[in-house]
Image (tube, rainbow, N blue to C red):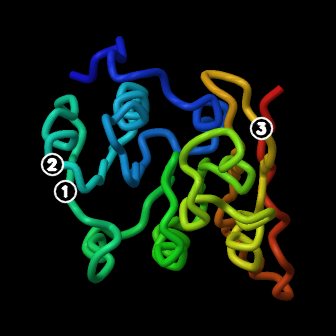
Amino acid sequence: MIPTHFPIGAPSTWLTRWAHLIRPGGRVLDLACGSGRHAAWLAQRGFAVLAVDRDAAAVGSLPAGIEGRVADLEQGAWPLDDAGRFDAVVVTNYLHRPLWPHLLRAVAPGGVLIYETFAAGNETVGKPSRPDFLLNPGELLDVARGTLRVIGYEDGTLEAPRVAFVQRICAVREVLGATPEAGRQVPPARYRLPV
């Protein structure tokens, strides 16, 4: 049973805004899950969650019902080759650019990438401040281009809980195909935008 109270922190508003695009009951990868605030929130809503982090203590303290895996995402080969594809890949407050191809491949047809992390400019207001940990202007758009359809994107500052420069994207891997008659394209799906 997944608790309905989240002592580990409230989920990102970016995730809660776009979670309706995840297939009901679908598989979700929470990458660099930390304390598991997103994994717990998603699991409580009926998603099958694989939460991955290098911190064994954090993974070990995830609520029952969440599959946890300890993996160093920045050393060696992609540790999730055996995990297949996901209806959603969720990443917040984490950036390791060599993972981009793996993350894009992990999004199943009809799946969604929900990503939010710090951006250039954050070095003027606090940490993280190293360029390795800050997205360049438009970088998330560049990552999705040609592979995923962007549904939502923001690049700016947040005032709470503290001032931070962030970039966020919600993008889907569309299921495109041809109709049997004359090979005509199927119209793109309609994605309900939050109000």
Q: Is residue 4 left or right of residue 67?
A: right
Foreground: disc 2 or disc 3: 3
User: Which labelled disc corresponds to residue 56?
Assistant: 2
Q: Which residue is found at the position 53% from the left and 73% from the top? A: 97
Q: Quadrant of the N terminus?
A: top left
Foreground: disc 3 or disc 1: 3
Q: Earlier in the sequence, mark 3 or mark 1?
A: 1
Is there a contact, CB below 8 Å, between mark 1 and mark 2?
Answer: yes
User: Which labelled disc corresponds to residue 157?
Assistant: 3
Q: Is disc 2 placed on a helix, strand or loop?
A: helix
Give the tally of numbered discs.
3
Residue type, mark 2 in image: Ala
Q: Is residue 69 left or right of residue 34?
A: left
Q: CA distance from mark 3 to mark 1?
A: 32 Å
Residue 141 percent coordinates (x, y): 77, 65
Q: Quadrant of residue 42?
A: top left
Label 3: few (<14), some (14–19) or many (≥20) C-alpha neighbours in 10 Å: some
Q: Earlier in the sequence, mark 1 or mark 2?
A: 2
Q: Earlier in the sequence, mark 2 or mark 3?
A: 2
Q: CA distance from mark 2 to mark 3?
A: 32 Å
Residue type, mark 3 in image: Thr
Residue 122 percent coordinates (x, y): 68, 47
User: Which labelled disc corresponds to residue 70?
Assistant: 1
Label 2: few (<14), some (14–19) or many (≥20) C-alpha neighbours in 10 Å: some
Q: Quadrant of the C terminus?
A: top right
Residue type, mark 1 in image: Val
User: Where 114 sits versus 145, above or below?
Assistant: above
Residue 60 percent coordinates (x, y): 13, 40
Label 1: few (<14), some (14–19) or many (≥20) C-alpha neighbours in 10 Å: some
User: Where 29 sits versus 158, above or below?
Assistant: below
Q: Is disc 1 placed on a helix, strand or loop?
A: strand
